[in-house]
Image (cartoon, rainbow, N blue to C red):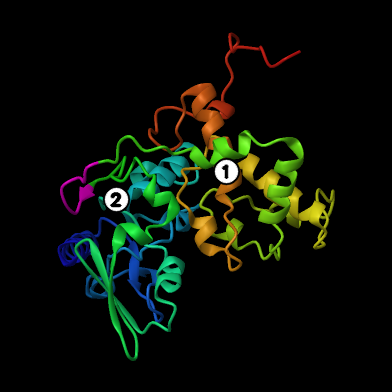
Amino acid sequence: MSGYIDKIQKISAQLLADKKVDMVIGFRKGTMPMINEPCTAKEPDDVGKFVWDSFCVMNLANYLTNRKEKIGIVAKGCDSRNIVNHIIENKIERDQLTIIGVPCTGMIDKNKVYSTIGKDIIEVKEEDDNILVKGRDFEKTINKSDVLRDNCAICIHRNPVIYDELVSDKVEEQKDVDRYEDVRKIEAMGSDEKWNFFDNLLAECIRCYACRNACPLCYCPTCFVDESRPQWVGKSQDPTDIKTFHLLRAYHCAGRCTDCGACVSACPMGIDVRQFTKKLEKDCFDLYGWEAGLTIDKRPPLDTFKPDDPEDFIK
């Protein structure tokens, strides 16, 4: 990963020195193990703080909405797909951006690491396909593939789909991945079983909206849950209000979600919010052959209309 870091810093410094961008958005080391945080550099001397490893989890496209500056941005595969979404949805212009693409081999789920170790962790280092975990009285090596985030384990778009600079050769994309095994299991359930499944899934939700705030698709000036005139959904912890929030948010992401996993990573209660968005992602693929964020030349299927669209769904 040191090669990635050197290249990211070098490209960023050159962009800033040449005044091609006003800032570069990347990652710096966080204060806690396994957490890197978004940061910006506005001068060439600032780029030394940029890092890259398998803990650069957050989707940096979230910081592009309605920006007016010229921006350089570090982007792995899912970030780049959400940048495409932003361009399509007119939240930023393509010529405002210089995209520093980073071929990705998957991000690590820190909760899986904590579960595997079962002790307080002081330091984590990445070494090729392994991570070395250190605590006060132990060191343990874990295979990275055993602790990948669930969305990364099934990702088939690890290379940036759009970029101006690339920090390394592209990585091999994963093939023969069953992306929707969990969705099919839920689809096969009866009505009562599905109801109970989602009841249990959302039982711990505290409506903190961390999933919404971390999502690069949730940029409405006023979210429907914050509206009071009209009030679309109650403000309480009533299970019906909680379900309404998650279901409506998921439908808002239909045809747009790239399965970046930002919602799951942000949830303080460990709820797998992707169980909602993945169903809609699967339906968009099955019905329209559509995967979000792969091209700026085509709009999402639910965003367009043709007079000869099939109408079998109208009874």
Secondary structure beneath dot 2 equals strand
Residue sitting at x 57%, y 55% = 272
Q: Position of residue 13 (x, y in %)?
A: 20, 65
Pinpoint residue 178: horizontal percent, then vertical percent: 41, 37
Say above or below: 118 vs 153: below
Task: State which tag comes first along the sequence, 1 or 2.
Answer: 2
**Residue type at numbered disc 1:** Thr
Q: Is residue 105 above or below residue 115?
A: above
Q: Quadrant of the C terminus?
A: top right
Task: Classify residue 183 by image quadrant.
Answer: top right
Mark 1 closeness class: few <14, some 14–19, many ≥20 residues within 10 Å: many
Res. 277 mark: 1
In the depicted structure, whether residue 276 falls above or below residue 222 = above
The residue lying at 35 percent from left, 59 percent from top is 146
Q: Pick the residue in front: 298 or 221.
A: 298
Q: Residue at x 20, y 64 (%)?
A: 1
Q: Is residue 28 above or below residue 169?
A: below
Is residue 263 on the magenta stretch? no
Report, in whole angstroms, how far the alpha carbon at label 1 lies from the one at label 2.
Answer: 29 Å
The part of the chain drawn in magenta is 165-172
Farthest residue, direction bottom: 136
Q: Main secondary structure of the magenta part?
A: loop
Secondary structure found at label 1: helix
In the drawing, what numbered circle is on residue 98? 2
